[in-house]
Image: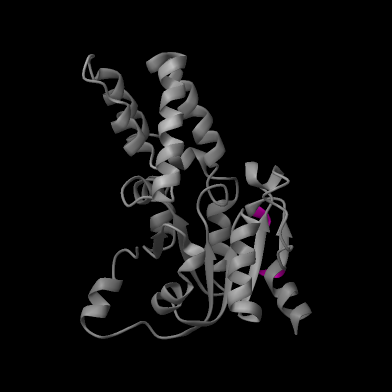
Amino acid sequence: MQFRWSRRLRARGKMPDSDDLILLFDCDNTLLDNDALLEDLRARMVDEFGQIDSDRYWVISEALRVELGYVDYLGALQRLRRKDRSDAPVMRMSSFLIDYPFSSRLYPGALEALRRLRAMGKTVIVSDGDAVFQPHKIKRAGLWAEVRGRVLIYIHKETMLDEIAKCYPARRYVMVDDKLRILSTMKQRWESRLTTVFPRQGHYARDPAAIAYPPADVVIEHIGDLNEAVLAARSRSAR
């Protein structure tokens, strides 16, 4: 899914000019601390529904993830509804999700990193997720405006490289993502055309199974550590 202008340009038979470098950023646990959001959601679910129905919500959520290929928080909440009781707790939970202060969950230095790297090339958010909650989260966090609407949302972004390149053609790309699996898959396709950056943040960075992949080109501890000097050093090393 590509937002804002791509449909209009395609209707006219035009595509954007090619750039020298495009910087692609994942959202969850790369720019935004999604683990902390989930902790808040789990605590609120227990408060609203009790432990039994809260556990039921997460079972539904996991089943939907397997079925759809992405986490659908609002869809799981809809399926949690019962005919034999008031929907008031469901309504409160939906409001909690929609009104959540996502900007407070941005990692320290995330916005600053996006701003610093504008000098190197266009910044683009490439995320996985649903077509309603995920773009809402990105907007409410302030990320949408920070990248000037350059947002792509797919079910599995690592399988959409041709589409990404069509939307934002460039000679070279940088991909910043907390999942080594995704970085490794993209690197296999784009090879030296892509520089991969792995910020060791979030639960995937601590999961032995999730890090059992070839290392990224650049490893940083926090997204705030990413700057022009880090990427320039990598570029010089590659040459």
User: How many marks can you see?
Assistant: 0
Q: How is the image coloured?
A: one colour
Viewer-closest of 88 and 107: 88
Image coordinates of residue 150 in percent, x first then y, are 39, 65
Observer-nearest residue: 22 or 56? Answer: 56
Viewer-nearest residue: 104 or 86:
86
Q: Please give the name of the residue rendered at 55% of the width and 73% of the height, measured from the top-left corner.
A: 119
Quarter placement of the C terminus: bottom right
In screen coordinates, is 18 left or right of 203?
A: left
Coordinates of residue 137 in the picture (x, y in percent): 39, 45
Q: Residue at x 40, y 19 (%)?
A: 53
Dominant secondary-structure state across the stretch colored magenta: helix
x, y percent for residue 91: 26, 25
Residue positioned 48% across, 72% down in the render: 161
Q: Is residue 192 above or below residue 114?
A: below
Residue at image location 63% in from the left, 71% down from the top:
187
Magenta residues, start to end: 224-229
Query: Where is residue 93, by image quadrant?
Result: top left
> Outermost residue toward the right?
237
Q: Considering only vertical position in the picture, is 205 above or below 54?
A: below
Q: Is residue 205 visible?
A: yes
Q: Position of residue 172 (x, y in %)?
A: 57, 80
Left or right: residue 72 compared with residue 211: left
Q: In which quarter of the image is the N terminus?
A: bottom left
Q: Does residue 51 sit above or below 122 in this rendering?
A: above
Q: Residue 56 occupies which quadrant of the picture?
A: top left
Q: Does the magenta stretch include residue 93?
A: no
Residue 101 in sight: no
Give the vertical position of 169 relative to 96 (above or below): below
